[in-house]
Image (cartoon, rainbow, N blue to C red):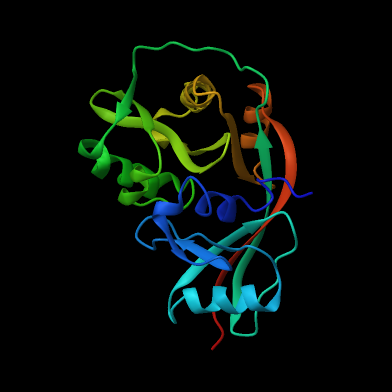
């Protein structure tokens, strides 16, 4: 039996994030203005055709799943990568730091600027609708942030962890990762995350705070074949 996180995008869009979904019982995608994620319920031909119909020409979408990614003839991968999916099923260290504050739409411009500099993954201002974000400001500047993204029954993804280059080395990524993981666990949910398999530094950080490898994942950025 497949784990709900083997197809995390599908599992989110079919359940807790259904309000953000376009598509049907075969294929779904997030509203493009929120995050460019799409998925199929399965890899059969009918589901793959439905996926193709969800992605307009000149647009791209990101697929993430444990199984090898199969595409219909109408779609091609313009980029692929191997990811690790990590999960924290046991309590992690509790942290308390008065600098950590919830970020709101008033912070959106700074958050987008930080994401543009650090490139933690797909991030838009409307991504704030998917879950809470927290950050640390130093000298009036947003120095680091982390938050929540995809949500499945009993699980929430830790995402958007990034620190501005001017403030790296101060443990802010660790602090905010632990803080967000605790926020998720306080609701009785299990935090998980994705990282590029080549990002050894990030993987070691997450291992040091209690995350373990759950699965290797495949990622592809796809668009219509010319």
Residue 148 vs residue 140: left or right?
right
Q: Nearer the viewer, residue 55 or 210?
A: 55
Residue 210 vs residue 129: left or right?
right
Most extreme residue toward the front is 25
Residue at image point 67% right, 56% down = 65
* Residue 223 makes an appearance in the image: no
Residue at image point 23% right, 26% down = 140
Residue 14 at x, y percent in the picture: 53, 54
Residue 224, placed above or below residue 86: below
Residue 110 at x, y percent in the picture: 27, 40
Residue 180, placed above or below residue 95: below
Q: Nearer the viewer, residue 54 or 177?
A: 54
Residue 165, placed above or below residue 223: above
Q: Nearer the viewer, residue 94 or 89?
A: 89
Residue 119, placed above or below residue 26: above
Residue 13 at x, y percent in the picture: 50, 54
Residue 64 at x, y percent in the picture: 62, 57
Quadrant containing the C terminus is bottom right
Q: How many marks?
A: 0
Residue at image point 30% right, 25% down = 137
Most extreme residue toward the bottom is 226
Q: Nearer the viewer, residue 189 or 37?
A: 189
């Amino acid at each position: 039996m497949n784990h709900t996180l083997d197809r995390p995008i599908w599992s989110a869009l079919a359940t807790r994030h259904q309000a953000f979904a376009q598509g049907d019982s075969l294929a779904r995608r997030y509203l493009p203005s929120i995050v460019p994620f799409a998925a199929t319920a399965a890899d059969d031909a009918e589901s793959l055709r439905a996926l193709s119909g969800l992605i307009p020409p000149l647009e791209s979408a990101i697929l993430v799943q444990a199984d090898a990614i199969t595409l219909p003839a109408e779609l091609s991968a313009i980029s692929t990568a191997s990811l690790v999916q990590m999960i924290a099923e046991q309590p992690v260290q509790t942290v308390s730091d008065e600098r950590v504050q919830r970020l709101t739409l008033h912070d959106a411009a700074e958050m987008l600027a930080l994401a543009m500099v650090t490139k933690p993954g797909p991030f838009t201002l409307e991504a704030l609708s998917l879950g809470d974000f927290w950050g640390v400001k130093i000298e009036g500047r947003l120095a680091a942030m982390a938050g929540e993204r995809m949500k499945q029954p009993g699980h929430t993804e830790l995402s958007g962890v990034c620190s501005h280059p001017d403030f790296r080395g101060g443990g802010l990524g660790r602090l905010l990762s632990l803080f967000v993981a605790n926020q998720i666990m306080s609701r009785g949910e299990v935090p998980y995350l994705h990282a590029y398999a080549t990002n050894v530094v990030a993987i070691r950080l997450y291992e040091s705070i209690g995350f373990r490898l759950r699965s290797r994942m495949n990622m592809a950025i796809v668009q219509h074949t010319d």
